[in-house]
Image: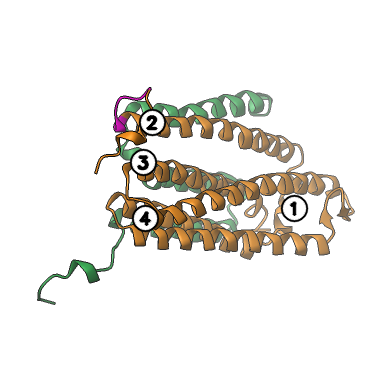
Chain colours: A green, B orange
Amino acid sequence: MSGIRRPKSRIWRPSTDLVLCWIGLLTLLGLTVTLSYQPLASFNFPVAMTIAAIKAGLVAAIFMELRHRSGVVCAFAAAGFFWLAILLWLGLMDFLTRV
Amino acid sequence: MSDTPDIAEHLATRAQRDDVLELGMWTFLSTEVLLFGGLILSYFVYRHADPQAFLAAGRETRIVIGTINTALLLTSSFCVAAALQAAEQGERHATRALLGIAILLGLSFLGLKGLEYVEEYREYLVPGIDFARTGENAHGIELFFIFYFIATLLHGIHVACGIGVLAVFAALATATRASSRYVAGLRTAALYWHFVDLVWIFLFALIYLPGRNS
């Protein structure tokens, strides 16, 4: 469509990155629900947690804008998950190592 | 437009103010990670102790409501991220509209969660109030539902607080002068809302998906 641009009447649109991220998240949601019904034996749980981690990564990188942030902000963001990793690692140590 | 008075006297620049806001929110979110992390650790411990019961309990949850609710929260997060982008570009009406949609999605999430609780009450799945399951898995199913109610209620409180914060920013979007302070505040509020979404992504995988293939 050609003609004079009329900024007043244009509709604001979010960036393509945000839209793609949203579509990706909904696709992963559909995928994880579908896979949970498949007979993958002991792999169902790791698959569900891996897809959850990918979704969380997308939210953190794109919606929370960590991909555009400096090292200091990323370090603060990672701190909570670092302590969580210690909590889960030590908390589950017995189960992970007992034979 | 100058918003120098928006900067507290111990801060030198607007950029420094924005950094302090963002780092402060991430520090708060770290404590939230450990709050929900402790709960999730207890889930892993009890699931390891009684895996069959947790699979049976997972099958008792409402996966349709859970999936719709996940889609609602993911979409609301998208709206809040878009609202921030609109605010950064000075599109104040778009900011208010997107925050309004995010609030409606959050309220729908809470409404569906309430409906789910009613259905679970009717099916005698509320430990401590009305729980009736028999058989060898009964104790493990009860533990699962104790985790379920504590985790989802705690998460629901976070959603309710987030809706309140978003409502304030939706009201301020067009009521006040456009300022970098508003954008920095909205960025901080958005981080909180995305975190609430992030917690739900994991709760969804732990609560609704186990035991579906058997």
Residue at 40% x, 43% y: name it. Answer: B187
Locate the N terminus of chain B by quadrant. Answer: top left
Residues packed near mark 3 inside 10 Å, few (<14), some (14 to 19) or many (20 plus): some
> Amino acid under label 1?
Ala
Mark closer to the chain start, 4 or 1: 1
* Residues beneath discs 1 and 2 located on the same chain: no
Residue receiving disc 4: B82
Residue at 79% x, 44% y: name it. Answer: B143
Residue receiving disc 2: A74
Depth-wise, is mark 3 or mark 1 nearer the camera? Answer: 3
SS for tag 1?
Answer: helix
Query: Along the line of sight, which residue is nearer the eye, A7 or B136?
Result: A7
The chief SS type of the magenta part is: loop
> Amino acid under label 3?
Arg
Say if residue B152 shows up in the picture: yes
SS for tag 4?
Answer: helix
Residue B11 belongs to the span the image colors magenta: yes
CB contact under 8 Å: marks 2 and 3:
no
Residue at 53% x, 63% y: name it. Answer: B104
